[in-house]
């Protein structure tokens, strides 16, 4: 298979990602918003789940934890700081910890990338060039600031942007079309954004996911990773950015997008 990741659509616009072991038989479940579609997917394909990874505590990311844990006796990996908010957490973890559930045969690293929530986890698989970014980095967008600050989020996004360009990015929601419409409003002259918007609309017409993206593509099309670009700084200036530094530009863009 060209990617070891499968996507299970859940709720209205969530994705539950499944990361396969190299032999294809075992999977880690990332952010099970609900259990039923995941159970069906596993049963139809005779897959054995070996772990749950949670990027953050929101119900549309942990809602299926208990039922899946009960059905398959699964360890749950997530941020130690969220031990009271992630149901069934068995492996409380900290920034830089290695994630190696038995049976997955892949080596993950946990990053704390706060901003959407006061703690938010990315599961990074450097050897496989994969990152599960939850609700921090979306295709052409980023998560809302529910508990964190603009400064935290800008730092978290910059950290992700530092990964190799070829890294594949999986996120928690199908927001791509709306995000690209916003990106085009910020940068009307960015041809790659316009092209990608057409492509994404076509994918959605066929009810296909627009994931994964890559870090390289995000650096070229995602306004929230482009806060140092003159065109983006100028657009943010017209929307009340207090200054031209990356955090002020980010804060103005985020505020603009919240009302877009
Ligand atoms: Zn969330």
Image: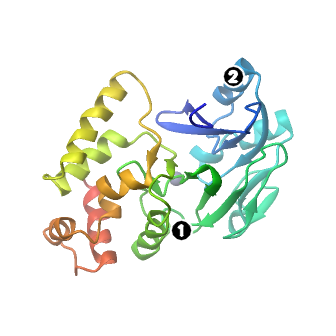
Above or below: residue 34 compared with residue 108: above
Residue 114 vs residue 241: left or right? right
Position of 245 compared to 231: left or right? right
Q: Nearer the viewer, residue 169 or 260?
A: 169
Q: Is residue 25 above or below residue 110?
A: above
| Image quarter (top left, top right, bottom left or bottom right) of the N terminus | top right
Q: Is residue 191 visible?
A: yes
Residue 89: x percent and y percent? 78, 55
Tag on residue 114? 1
Q: Residues within 10 Å of mark 1 (few under 14, many from 20)?
A: many
Residue 132, image x and y in percent? 57, 51
Q: Quadrant of residue 48?
A: top right
Q: Nearer the viewer, residue 77 or 168?
A: 168
Cβ of mark 1 under 8 A from ligand 1: no
Q: Is residue 41 above or below residue 222?
A: above
Q: Residue at x 64, y 35 (%)?
A: 34
Mark closer to the chain start, 2 or 1: 2
Looking at the picture, the colour scheme in use is: rainbow
- SS for dot 2: helix
How many residues crowd around disc 2 within 10 Å: few (fewer than 14), some, or many (20 or more)?
few
Q: Looking at the rendered structure, which numbered label has been put on residue 216?
A: none
Residue extending farthest to the top is 44
In which quarter of the view is residue 241 placed? bottom left
In this view, the residue in front, 139 or 229, is: 229
Residue sitting at 43 percent across and 45 percent down?
213
What residue is shown with label 2? Answer: 40
Q: Is residue 125 visible?
A: no
Q: Quadrant of residue 43?
A: top right
Q: Position of residue 225 (x, y in %)?
A: 35, 63
Alpha carbons under labels 2 and 1: distance apart: 32 Å
Question: As drawn, is 69 to the left or to the right of 116?
Answer: right
Q: Work out whether 172 lies above or below 122.
A: above
């Amino acid at each position: 298979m060209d990617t070891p990741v499968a996507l299970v659509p859940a709720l209205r616009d969530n994705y539950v990602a499944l990361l396969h072991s190299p032999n294809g038989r075992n999977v880690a479940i990332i952010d099970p918003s609900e259990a039923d579609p995941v159970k069906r997917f596993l049963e139809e394909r005779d897959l054995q789940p070996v772990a749950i990874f949670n990027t953050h505590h929101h119900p549309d990311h942990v809602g299926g934890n208990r039922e899946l844990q009960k059905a398959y006796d699964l360890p749950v990996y997530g941020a130690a700081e969220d031990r009271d908010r992630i149901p069934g957490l068995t492996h409380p973890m900290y920034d830089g910890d290695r994630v190696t559930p038995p049976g997955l045969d892949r080596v993950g690293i946990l990053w704390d990338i706060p901003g959407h929530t006061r703690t938010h986890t990315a599961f990074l698989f450097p050897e496989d060039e994969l990152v599960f970014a939850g609700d921090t980095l979306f295709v052409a967008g980023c998560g809302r600031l529910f508990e964190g600050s603009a400064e935290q989020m800008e730092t978290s996004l910059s950290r992700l942007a530092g990964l190799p360009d070829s890294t594949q990015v999986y996120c928690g929601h199908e927001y791509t079309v709306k995000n690209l419409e916003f990106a085009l409003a910020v940068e009307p002259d960015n041809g790659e954004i316009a092209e990608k918007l057409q492509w994404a609309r076509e994918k959605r017409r066929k009810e296909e996911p627009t994931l994964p993206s890559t870090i390289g593509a995000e650096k070229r099309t995602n306004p929230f990773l482009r806060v140092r670009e003159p065109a983006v700084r100028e657009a943010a200036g017209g929307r009340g950015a207090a200054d031209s530094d990356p955090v002020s530009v980010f804060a103005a863009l985020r505020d603009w997008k919240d009302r877009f």
